[in-house]
C-alpha cells in the first residue's frame, strides 16, 4: 500500500518544531515497521527553489519548494495547487493529511484521511494580534468547510470530536497522538522542586500565568525552579514575559531554554518533579503525553482537550488557567508530598503505554488505512 503522509516535517527528525512535526516523525517511524506500507512524506519548504527527495526513517521524503506568506493563503491557494498536483503524479493508494495540509487536499479524488491537531480559528483569537477577530472568523469558515469535505477524520481527543459535531460528514476515528518510544524508557533522577514546561511561548500557552504561580510558590517558602523549553512565537508576549520575570526578581529561578532537542527534553524530564502546562486552548498537547510516558506527574488546565489526558487526583491535577493561586496551590501540593508525586507519575506512565505508544498508534492508524481502501473498492 502506497501511503502519502502530507504534513509539516522537519529536516532533522531529532529536532521537530512543534507538536505536528513531532507527531509526524513518530508516526512515520512506527508505520515504517509494517512491511506492506510504502511510505512517502510530502511537505512544503519555503527555503527551497527546487524539489528535493531523500530517504529518512523508513520513508521517502518529498520536499516541495513553498512560498513565503500567510498560512491561510498558502493553504487555500498556491500551496494547495502545488500539493494536489504533486499527489496526482505520485499516485498513492491513500493520502493522510495533517493540520493545514488537510485544507490542501480538499476535494482530491484519492482516498483520504485527515488528522486534526487543533483549531486555528480558536488559536487566532487568543493571539490578540491585529484583526484577530475577523481573521478568526475567516479561519473558522475555511476550517469547518475543510472538515465537512473529509471522508475520514482521525480525532486525537474527545475534545476534537466534540468540535466536529454537526460539521463533519465523514467517518471519525479516535486515535491519540503517538510519542517517541524513547520517552517510555527515561531513567528518572528526580530533583525535588524542578518544574518543567515544554511549549512555545505565546498568549495561548499562558506562560506568564505559570511564572506568576511559580512566584507565589517562592513567596510561600518552596525551594523550586522553573525551566521552560520553547521558542517565543509572539515577540510582544515574549517581551512581556521577560519583563515579568525581571520585575518579580526571578531571573535566577526561571530558565528559558528555547527550542531544545528530543534528547534534551529527555534530560529535563528525567529530573523534573512536575510537568506544568496551563494553556487556554489545546487539543492533545504532546508535552503532557511525553511527560506522562516518562512518569512525571502533571499540572495542567481544566479545559479543552487537557482533561481527557488525565484524571484529576490520579496522574496529576487539573487547574483553572485564569487563577494563578489555583495553579500555585496544586503545584505546592505536589511539592510537599513526595509519595504522591511518585504514585501519580507511575499512574501516568501506565496510562500512556496503551494510548500514546507509537506501535499502538501506528497499528490503529494502519487499520484505518485498510478500512478506507476496503470501502473504496466496495
Image (tube, rainbow, N blue to C red):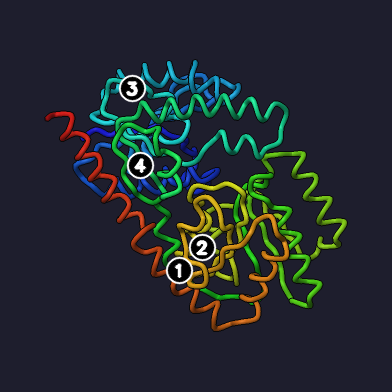
Q: Is residue 333 left or right of residue 64?
A: right
**Left or right: 43 in relation to 319:** left
Name the residue tied to disc 2.
291
Q: Please tell me whether residue 204 is drawn above or below residue 335 in the rendered image.
A: above
Q: Tag count in the figure?
A: 4
Q: Earlier in the sequence, mark 4 or mark 3?
A: 3
Residue 40 lies in what quarter of the image? top left
Mark 1 vs 4, N-terminal side: 4
- Give the spatial CA distance, label 4 vs label 3: 20 Å
The quadrant in which the N terminus is found is top left
- Which residue, as the protein is rendered here, is positioned at the far front? 166
Mark sitting earlier along the chain (4/2): 4
Q: CA distance from mark 2 to mark 1?
A: 8 Å
| Picture residue at 74% right of the left edge, 76% below the top | 223
| Residue 40 visible, this orientation | no
Depth check, front residue: 231 or 217: 217
Counting from the top left corner in percent of width and height, residue 60 is at 34, 34
Residue behind mark 1: 348
**Does the CB distance between marks 3 and 2 fall below 8 Å?**
no
The location of residue 104, given as percent across then percent down, is 43, 24
Labels 1 & 3 near each other (Cβ < 8 A) = no
For label 2, the SS is: helix
Mark 1 → mark 4, Cα distance in angstroms = 24 Å
Say whether disc 3 or disc 2 marks the residue closer to the N-terminus: 3
- Tags 2 and 1 in contact by the CB under 8 Å rule? yes
Q: Secondary structure at mark 3?
A: helix
Image depth: mark 1 or mark 3 in front: 1
Residue 87: which numbered mark, if any?
3
Amino acid at each position: 500500500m502506497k501511503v502519502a503522509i502530507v504534513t509539516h516535517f522537519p529536516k532533522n527528525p531529532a529536532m521537530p518544531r512543534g507538536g505536528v512535526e513531532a507527531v509526524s516523525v513518530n508516526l512515520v517511524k512506527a508505520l515504517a515497521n509494517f512491511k506492506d506500507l510504502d511510505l512517502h512524506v510530502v511537505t512544503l519548504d519555503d527555503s527551497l527553489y527546487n524539489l528535493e527527495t531523500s530517504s529518512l526513517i523508513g520513508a521517502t521524503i518529498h520536499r516541495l519548494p513553498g512560498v513565503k506568506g500567510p498560512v491561510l493563503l498558502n493553504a487555500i491557494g498556491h500551496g494547495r495547487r502545488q500539493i494536489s498536483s504533486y499527489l496526482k503524479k505520485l499516485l498513492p493508494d491513500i493520502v493522510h493529511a495533517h493540520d493545514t495540509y488537510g485544507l490542501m487536499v480538499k476535494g482530491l479524488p484519492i482516498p483520504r484521511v485527515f488528522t486534526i491537531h487543533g483549531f486555528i480559528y480558536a488559536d487566532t483569537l487568543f493571539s490578540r494580534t491585529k484583526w484577530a477577530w475577523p481573521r478568526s472568523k475567516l479561519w473558522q469558515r475555511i476550517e469547518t468547510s475543510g472538515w465537512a469535505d473529509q471522508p475520514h477524520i482521525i480525532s486525537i481527543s474527545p475534545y476534537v470530536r466534540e468540535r466536529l459535531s454537526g460539521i463533519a460528514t465523514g467517518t471519525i476515528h479516535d486515535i491519540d497522538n503517538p510519542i517517541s518510544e524513547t520517552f517510555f524508557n527515561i531513567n528518572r533522577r528526580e530533583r525535588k522542586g524542578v518544574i518543567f514546561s515544554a511549549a512555545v511561548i505565546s498568549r495561548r500557552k499562558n506562560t506568564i500565568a505559570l511564572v506568576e504561580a511559580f512566584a507565589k510558590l517562592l513567596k510561600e517558602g518552596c525551594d523550586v525552579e522553573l525551566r521552560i523549553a520553547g521558542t517565543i512565537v509572539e515577540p510582544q508576549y515574549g517581551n512581556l514575559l521577560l519583563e515579568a520575570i525581571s520585575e518579580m526578581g526571578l531571573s535566577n529561578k526561571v530558565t528559558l531554554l528555547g527550542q531544545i532537542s528530543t534528547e534534551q527534553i529527555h534530560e529535563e524530564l528525567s529530573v523534573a518533579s512536575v510537568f506544568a502546562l496551563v494553556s487556554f486552548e489545546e487539543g492533545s498537547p504532546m508535552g503532557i503525553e511525553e511527560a506522562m510516558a516518562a512518569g512525571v506527574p502533571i499540572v495542567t488546565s481544566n479545559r479543552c482537550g487537557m482533561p481527557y489526558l488525565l484524571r484529576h487526583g490520579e496522574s496529576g491535577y487539573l487547574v483553572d488557567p485564569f487563577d494563578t493561586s489555583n495553579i500555585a496551590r496544586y503545584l505546592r501540593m505536589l511539592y510537599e508530598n513526595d509519595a504522591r508525586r511518585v504514585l501519580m507519575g507511575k499512574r501516568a506512565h501506565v496510562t500512556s503505554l496503551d494510548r500514546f505508544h507509537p506501535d499502538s498508534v501506528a497499528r490503529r492508524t494502519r487499520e484505518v488505512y485498510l478500512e478506507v481502501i476496503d470501502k473504496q473498492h466496495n
